[in-house]
Amino acid sequence: MDPDRALEILKDQACSEEVIDHAKAVAEKSVEIAENISDRSGKVDVELIKIGALLHDIGRSRTHGIPHGVEGGRILREIGLEEFARFAENHLGAGITGEEAEKLGLPERDYLPNSLEEKIVTYADNLVRGHEFQTYEQALKELRGELGPEHPSIERFRKIHNEIKKLGGIRQ
Ligand SMILES: [Fe+2]
């Protein structure tokens, strides 16, 4: 899919300018990481990531609460874009387990980023605040502040960071 088409879809769904600017920044960061990995091993789908990142917050057209992930997946499946639904469903925090989902009132199942592509978008989403970039350390601090220092998402985020770093995704 052309990135312009993805942006059109966000507008059709009545996503705000803020959501669209955020999506563009997440796509930029995701592609940067994916291209770094691609230069090393070539085992990552940069095009899939670009569109997945642009569409990951489409559910914010309906709600900004935690269900925006599930809602986004539902919208994408409805409009025949099932291949991108998991980017929306599995991007919150660093993923949500079935047990946590139940407590949060979400339909009970795992919402964990599985593929490397999903992990990259989830990771990049944490590195973008609004449409501004932040470092991994800042993102970690933000997550700790939001969820509490002992929340399992902190460890999940750290694991994704280490995996991406090992693959050469982060250049500093
Ligand atoms: Fe989101």
Image: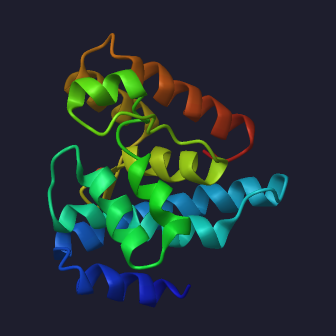
* Residue 162 in sight in this render: yes
For the N terminus, the image quarter is: bottom right
Residue 82 place in picture, x, y as percent: 50, 68
Q: Is 37 above or below relative to 54?
A: above
Q: Nearer the viewer, residue 89 or 151?
A: 89
Q: Is residue 32 left or right of residue 82?
A: right
Residue 149 place in picture, x, y as percent: 30, 13
Residue at x-position 32% and y-position 30%: 101
Q: Is 22 above or below relative to 126?
A: below
For the C terminus, the image quarter is: top right
Residue at x-position 48% and y-position 74%: 81
Residue at x-position 56% and y-position 45%: 119
Q: Which color scheme did the rendering employ for the protein?
A: rainbow
Q: Is residue 26 left or right of residue 64?
A: right
Residue 127 place in picture, x, y as percent: 40, 46
* Residue 24 in sight in this render: no
Q: Is residue 100 left or right of residue 160?
A: left
Residue at x-position 47% and y-position 30%: 157
- Identify the image quadrant of residue 35: bottom right
